Image (spheres, grey):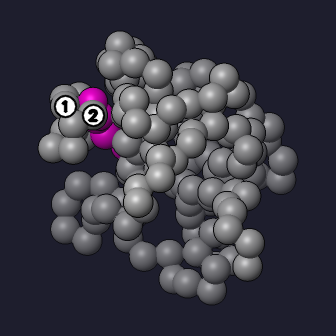
Amino acid sequence: MEQRITLITLGVSDLARSKAFYEALGWRGQEVAETVFFQAGGLGLVLWSRDKLAKDCGLEPGPEPGPGPGHGFGGIALAHNVRSEAEVDALLATVTQAGGTVTKPAAVNEIGFYSSAFTDPDGHAWEVAYNPGFPLADDGTVTLPDFG
């Protein structure tokens, strides 16, 4: 298996609501056969029915994400790195206006970079961070440092 990810699919409970949320963040997608596709740099972010995605993976859908018993973190966090602390703050304001929930206020974290976290309307976790140690190219691709 080659070391790459080509698509990330998020199982959503309301496709129209989720599409509107990501479009409010400035993303532009294409809806085809009850599925929304967003080009996200060198990979695709896909929105699809949570139940259909679970079935396609041979799994039971399980509880909807969200607050309360039987709900919560789905075990995956997506990350969006930006070029400044101001961009982190601006994105959080847009997330709130679009119907997302800031789950961790922006601050310098224990590792030393500025980050925050939010969830989309279906509870999918996102980190947004400014980390000068992970430089972004003009096209938005990240270069991981040599940790050795």
What is the x, y in percent for residue 98? 45, 24
Residue at position x 41%, y 56% in the image: 147
Q: Specify the farthest residue to the right.
A: 32
Q: In the depicted view, which residue is nearer to us: 78 or 129?
A: 129
Amino acid beneath label 1: Val
Q: In the depicted view, which residue is nearer to us: 66 or 40?
A: 40
Q: Can residue 124 be seen in this view?
A: no
Q: In this view, does 99 lie to the left or right of 43?
A: left
Q: Is residue 72 left or right of residue 79?
A: left
As helix, strand or loop, the secondary structure at mark 2 comes to loop
Q: Are marks 2 and 1 in contact (CB under 8 Å)?
A: yes
Q: Is residue 12 left or right of residue 101?
A: right
Amino acid beneath label 2: Phe
Location of residue 83 with respect to 1 vertically, above or below: above
Q: What stretch is highlighted in magenta?
A: 114-120
What is the x, y in percent for residue 125? 38, 49
Location of residue 12 with respect to 143 vertically, above or below: below
As helix, strand or loop, the secondary structure at mark 1 comes to strand
Residue at position x 39%, y 29% in the image: 132
Q: Specify the farthest residue to the left.
A: 110
Q: Residue 113: which disc?
A: 2
Q: Can residue 22 be seen in this view?
A: yes
Q: Specify the farthest residue to the front.
A: 148
